[in-house]
Amino acid sequence: MKKKLVNNIAFFTLLITIIVALGHVMTPQFMVKYHLANTKAGVVTLLQAEAKDSLDVLVVGDSESYTSVSPVQLWEKYGVTSYAAGQIAARLSESRDILATAMETQSPTVVLLETNSLYRNDKKDDSLQGKISEYISDHCTLIKQHDCWKSPIHTASNNYKGFWINYDVVPCDASNYMTPTDQEEPICQENLDTLHEMEEICKKNGAELVLYSAPSPVNYNYAKHNALAELAEKEGLSYLDLNLCSEEMAIDWNTDSRDGGDHLNSAGAEKTTDYIGQYLMDHYSLKDRRNMKIAKSWNSLVDEYNAKSERAIQIITGKLEPNQKTAMK
Amino acid sequence: MAYNTNTYFILFLPIAMLLYQILPKRYRWVGLLLSSMAFFVLISDVLIYWAIITTAITYVGGVALERIQSPDKKVKKRKQKHVVQLCVIAVVGILAVLKYTAFTLDLVNQLMAKLGNDTSFQAGKILVPIGISFYTLQAVGYLLDVYWKRLEAEKNPAKLLLFMIFFPTLMEGPICRYSDTKDQLFEGEAISCDSIVAGAIRIGYGLFKRMVISDRLYWFVNNFYRPSSNYTGAMIIICAVATTVQLYLEFSGTIDIVIGSARIFNVRLPENFRQPFLAKSAAEFWRRWHISLGTWFKNYIFYPVTTSKLMKRWNKYGRKHMGKYITMVVTSAIALFPVWMLNGLWHGPKIPYILYGVYYFVILLAEVMIEPAGLRFWKLIHLNPEGRIVSCFRIARTWIIIFAGEMLFRAETLEQFITMCKNIFVGDFLTHDMYIEVFNMGISKSDALLIAIACLIVIAMDLRLEYYPDTLEMIPQLSRPKRWAIYYFMIFAILIFGAYGIGYDPAELIYAGF
């Protein structure tokens, strides 16, 4: 009996030691260094690893956000430092949490909120089950970051400040998706409340919250545009609907979507980033940081990013043979 | 609160264990009853009164069956028959009214519309307690066992209530027989280190199957069955395989958790799965898949039909006038038809479920019909029907039957299932777009790789369990390094590779809806 007890104590002591030790090893710096943070939970880790007060623009939202804004491209063209802190299938409350976390170390001038998550009605789990999960996750790094094993397999090297280089092409028919109508697609009250909280966070930290809708025939229509435009007006926020500027940006839905009109690929993102960059420069007084100290670390990304990006565009436009694609992966 | 939630493992189970352990041996079953009632209330709120009503009917019926006395044996038998009929109709009636009213009225409305009379019968909102299908079958089994004198009626209604709503079996079964579980339920054997370890190993394996594979596949599979989905070619094959794998690991994983939970309290529940993908025929598949349901139908529907006086008379007549083969086929058809219609209906008020029953009725009958010809065929081409080559062929053939069946089972409507079957032959079978599409449906390449590796582990385990069924029970007997290595592997595999936390929505217990 005594022997069994000692055995059990030894077993659980070793178990807890391993869990705690792994938690201590998995610091944001460690996760970034070994490309272990390219997961949904890892977005926060990567953001936390950014130098203090180094970001002018923060992009939040679901997958529509980090597939439509490329921070390295914004840097190269405008000298603006930004971070695409969107998460896959993010609820608005998750974007709010990321925004709050980011504000602990950053003071961005502009916060761009991609609006698709305003139409996600999945509610936060406020049950006892949800609270226990949250508590365990907050107090055990291994559990919080348990998905990190995916990162090395997840083409980690294609992640540039939250933006993922992608060269998949699945065309879509986008001929009539933004046909004008007077109808409005309502946004649920819970998301409106969360938006108010995000506005408060931005106000408190001196940042301008801007709503924008990435081009996506699968997710947007004119009824949503009407509702979002009215919401922005009511809240006194700027709203940029890129779905209405597809022609102006020369989006080609035969080549610029990775998955039949849900998300953009690198070719599409290049066009939207250009447009958003110009919009930001026209409307907000953002500093050109290319001559500042921070430029060194950002410039170090540019050549590699451009080479990969150019390669992706060549694959998208069919200028590279299929067997050459593997070289990029 | 489901079996795969942290509230179950961190709060409910430890409290239930503590309550059980602190009570004196003879009252420990009361602890289990209180825990089971609390569990029921936590998942179905006040609807527990339906379980209490069903138990009351079953209890009164059982006691009445034993108390009926008459000097005339025939009168006694007739009275007992009336009692058992009345009680079975009452408990099944509760299930039928709660679960099938809306469905029946909808069918009536559709039928009337086709006949040119528009009716709009509405059932209103009926709340159904979780697990009603499981405990109703247990109640019917209990009544029939008492009626057939295979069992003495329980004199304590509270003990019968515990049997009906024992918390590990409440949501997904297995469907137990009173005679098999009563002694263990009421014995009050103390929880020991050994029982905790044996239970935890089983729970760990169940969580591995559920959290690493099934929950990871959940949203991927769901995407195929959205009304707007229009997949073609190889995507439908992927859908059929993924649906089956997800359902098997969800259900069998939950049953592992259920059996493990009960094992902690020294209650050994019957197995519900026995390596179903090694079955060589659809009939064998159903002896390995959801065994407790198949056994229930065999004991309480199939055997009573085949051994009825009418069937005996038919057998005698058939063999004399129509030959052995025709008699066997007709007998099988008559006995299998109610089994499979009820099996389909039991799963729920949905046309695909009923057709799922019809599907297996047709397949099983076809197997009965072609078996003699099949044996002749294998002999003709000089192959041993029990040999490796024929066995592999038969297993592969059974897989096709299973995959198609599970796709029908999971389809929202019959139209969706038919469209999916047709779509296999639409367009190119395999395209590069499909490759992109697959990884845009809720799983990434890393998920797919993990699922493949984890499936290989489950396959290896299933193959071992086929020859050494007590493999999991034997783990505590291994040397300490081996034992600890297995425990740590299981714990860290679930912690690191489990589909939970940020980015995962909890997957439903599919069978809990039945």
Image (tube, rainbow, N blue to C red):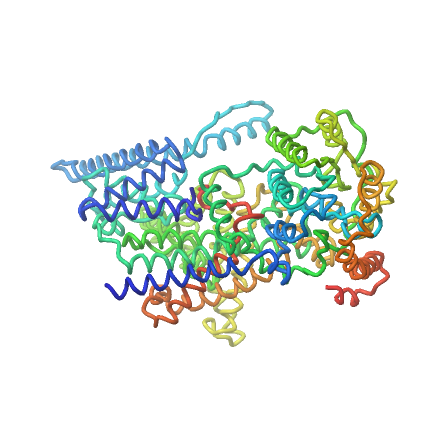
Q: Horizontally, is A306 left or right of B398 in the view?
A: right
| Front residue of B13 and B41 | B13
Compared to residue A32, the image places residue A231 above or below, namely: above
- Judge by depth and name the residue closer to the eye, A310 or B164: A310
Quarter of the rendering occupied by the N terminus of chain B: top left
Q: Residue at x 32, y 62 (%)?
A: A8
Q: Is residue A92 left or right of residue B382?
A: right
Q: Quadrant of residue A286?
A: top right
Q: Position of residue B359 (x, y in %)?
A: 51, 49
Height in image: B153 above or below A75? above
Question: In the shown orientation, is residue B17 left or right of residue B394?
Answer: left
B210 in relation to A11, above or below: above
Q: Quadrant of the C terminus of chain B?
A: top left
Along the viewing direction, whichever of B308 and B435 lies nearer the viewer: B435
**Location of residue B410 in the rendering, given as x and y in whole percent from the top left corner:** 54, 46
Q: Quadrant of residue B45?
A: top left
The percent coordinates of residue B282 (x first, y second) are: 47, 58
B70 and A206: which is toward the camera? A206
Asked if one can make out residue B316 in the rendered structure from this viewpoint, the answer is: yes
Query: Residue placed farthest to the front in the image?
Result: A293
How many numbered tags mark residues here? 0
